[in-house]
Every structure is written in structure tokens, then in C-alpha cells.
Image (tube, rainbow, N blue to C red):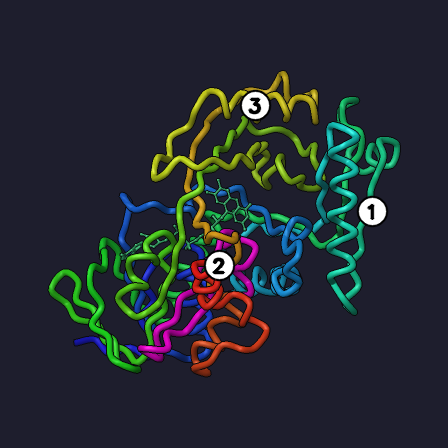
Amino acid sequence: MPDFDAIVIGGGLVGTAVAYGLIRRGQKVGVLDEGDIAYRASRGNFGLVWVQSKGFGVPEYQRWTRRSSEDWAGFSTELLQETGIATGHERPGGLTPCLTESEFDKRQQLMEQLRSEAGDIPFEFDMLRPAALKKMLPVIGPDVVGASYTPYDGHANPLYTLRALHAALLKRGGHYVPGSRIENINAAPRQFSVTVRGETFSAPRVVLGAGLGNKALGAMVGLNVPVRPLRGQIIVTERLQPVLPMPTLMIRQTVEGTIMIGESREEAGFDDATSPEIIRTLAERAVKTFPFLRNVRIVRTWGALRVMAPDGLPVYEQSREFPGAFVCTCHSGVTLAAAHALHYAGYVIDGALPPELARFSTERFNVLAAA
Ligand SMILES: Cc1cc2nc3c(=O)[nH]c(=O)nc-3n(C[C@H](O)[C@H](O)[C@H](O)COP(=O)(O)OP(=O)(O)OC[C@H]3O[C@@H](n4cnc5c(N)ncnc54)[C@H](O)[C@@H]3O)c2cc1C
């Protein structure tokens, strides 16, 4: 019976970030992961490390996101040193282009709200009109009336990030078990065990990092995790010479040269297919924003499922019924990867989540249900 300090269920960006964070602090960690037929947002996402749309009305979320984005460069360097794998992280700032005056006004209000809610932490932003915007992004189109800019935004290659996390885990002696769908957790306070493929794993801590699987797993350890799928569709083009020096909310150029176009949001249940209407809408907006894209070839489109709580915030909690069982789940697992590895894992070892994460507790769902 392999004994661990912690079992992490889920081997996507969230589970492996926490697992890596545990192992870099000397913990013995086993990661159990369902495998190729599971829903895996970490393999289908857009790759932004994004601050400027996060936390309207929830300053705790803005601060947590900002902290992760500040930590990302060091996190990326550490993974490179550990594994030789570059995550492709860059933090050149980011833009949200607006195609109408009303979009621009609304955007400005939201950015002002973020600044006022940032409290004593400075929040820099600019609302740029086309002349200033063109200096930053010469290829911007004439239909763009302006854009918001913050210096805090960036992007990374989520697949290389995931690969680096897996490689770092293995290099440090972590135990990764693929093809391991967990259907049952034997739970007692600070004593958990799971049996998979004839092998039993036990540990005083278990971290649920299983994305959409956390709803069912949470119920096994007294945690209410009402996450649901929210589909996003993405277009990727052929490789081009560098043309976009910074990411925008919907369109970014990867380090490999492809252009990614994304940011759709649909309630489609567990259907992760693409649809011509959404792809057309994404492509039309992309061509309006950057007219040169009209002549660029699309090489692939895909759909993937976000892991979404009812209020869109992360869910961080330790079970009251079964102390030692934690859940870590969110819809921005690229952005928050650094925070999960460098901070959340430490809280799991300490056995308590800090007050600044209280806003993300599952208690809020009881309030929502009672309202
Ligand atoms: C279209 C799209 C665009 C996105 N863009 C961005 C972006 O730009 N920036 C950003 O920060 N985030 C973005 N996201 C969100 C990001 O991808 C997710 O937050 C992140 O991938 C979630 O990671 P995860 O590990 O929680 O979930 P997943 O990647 O879904 O991984 C969950 C893992 O748990 C395993 N699992 C599930 N159930 C079980 C079980 N019972 N037993 C064992 N294992 C189990 C699965 O096998 C899977 O490997 C986007 C998501 C989508 C869909």
C-alpha cells in the first residue's frame, strides 16, 4: 500500500501545479489522473495569464490573480531550470480591443472599477485611442475604436506548462498514475485512501484537482463543489512571422507563430464540439480587429469545456467533515498556476487556508442556495 503525504486527484494544470508545489516542499505525492477520454480543459485552452478582466466586484479575486501574474515569471524560470522545458511565458502587457463606442465606454467603467477596488495596490491602466494603439500594435484595423491596456497581462503555452509540471513532478520522485478514474474515496479525518487498478494509495491529505470531476469527488469528502462545464471554441492559424507583440483578450500570437482566436462562452452541457456559427463569429471579429487575418489560413478549430462555479470564482476549501481534504478548482488555471504551485500547496501542508482565500470558500454556495 503506497503511502503518501498527499494524494492529488487530477493531472491537469490545477492538480499538477498543486502537486508540484507540494513536492518542491519535500512532500511525498501521488497524482491519480483519469486519462485521455476525460474532459481536460488544460489541453484545450487559450493560454492567457490575464489580469484585466478578473475580479470586478471581488477585490480578493483581483489580488489573487495579480499575485499569480507577478509570480509567473519566476515560476516559469524555475520550471525551465528543473526540466529544460520553456513554458513560453511572456508578460508584455495586454489589450482588450473595442469595436464600438459603447464597448469602449463599458470597458472604461470596468477598468475604473478595478482600479477603485484595488485599494492601496496601484492598478495602472490606459484607455487607448487608435493613434496610441497603432504605436503598440501597428496591425490594428480601422474598425477598432480603442482598447484598454494593463501592464499586468501576459500569456504562456499551456501545453508546455503542463508538460513541464509533469516532468518536474517525476524528476522529484512524484508518483503519477494515468488511467486512474477515482470512483470512491475512503475518508476519515486526516486519513484518506483510494484504490485504483488493484493498488491502494493512502495519505493524510487529499487534494481534489480534477476539474469537472470535482463535483462528484467533493461529495465523497463532504465538499460541495457545484462546478459545471462552459464551452469555449478556439481557432488556430498557420504560423506567421512575429506580428502581434502582445496578447489581446481574444487574439494572441503564440511563441511558435500561430495566431489563436478564442473567447467564446456557451452553455452546451458536456458537448465539446465546435459549431460553424461560433467559429464564424470569432473569425469575423478577428478580421475586424486585425484585417491582415483575412488572408491567413486556419489550420484547426476545437471546443473545450471550462470548469465554472456558479459565480465564476475559484473554489478553495478544506472539508470540515474530513479535515485534510482540500479542493482547488477554477476557470483560469493557466493564470493561477503560479499561485497554486507557490502558495496554495503551502496552505495544504499548513492544514489551513488563509483568510485572504475565505471569499472562495464553498460557504458561499450555501448562501446562494438559501437566497
Ligand atoms: C476554451 C478555453 C479557453 C481557456 N482559456 C484560458 C486562458 O486563456 N487562461 C486561463 O488561465 N485559463 C483558461 N481556461 C481555463 C483553463 O483551461 C482551466 O482553468 C484549467 O485547465 C483547469 O484545469 P484543471 O486541472 O482544473 O482541469 P482539467 O484540465 O479538466 O483536468 C482535470 C483532470 O482531472 C482528471 N479527472 C477528472 N475526474 C477524475 C476522477 N474521478 N479521477 C481521476 N482523475 C479525474 C481528468 O483526467 C483531467 O486530467 C480556458 C478554458 C477553456 C475551455
Q: Which dot, 1 or 2, sits closer to the camera?
A: 2
Q: Do the residues labelled 3 and 2 touch (CB within 8 Å)?
A: no
The reply to whether residue 139 is in sight is no
What residue is rendered at 35% in x and 80% in y? 323
Residue range corresponding to the magenta coloring: 316-339
Q: Which residue is found at the position 61% from the left and 48% from the top?
A: 155
> Residue at label 1?
126
Nearer the observer, 261 or 242: 261
Q: Mark 3 points at which residue?
A: 281
Identify the mark nearer the N-term, 1 or 2. Answer: 1
Please name the amino acid that badge 1 sits on: Asp
C-alpha separation, residue under disc 3 versus residue under disc 2: 36 Å
Q: Which residue is identified by label 2? A: 371
Relative placement, left or right, of 117 versus 271 is right
The type of residue carrying mark 2 is Ala
From this view, report whether residue 99 is shown above or below residue 62. above
Q: Is residue 108 above or below residue 359?
A: above
Callout 2: 10 Å neighbours few (<14), some, many (20+)? few
Residue 127 in the image, given as x and y percentages of width and height: 82, 42
Pointer 1: residues within 10 angstroms few (<14), some, or many (20+)?
few
Q: Which residue is drawn at 39% across and 56% down?
A: 226
What separation in Å lies between label 1 and label 2 (alpha carbons)?
38 Å
Q: In this view, does 29 lie to the left or right of 247?
A: left
Badge 1 element: strand
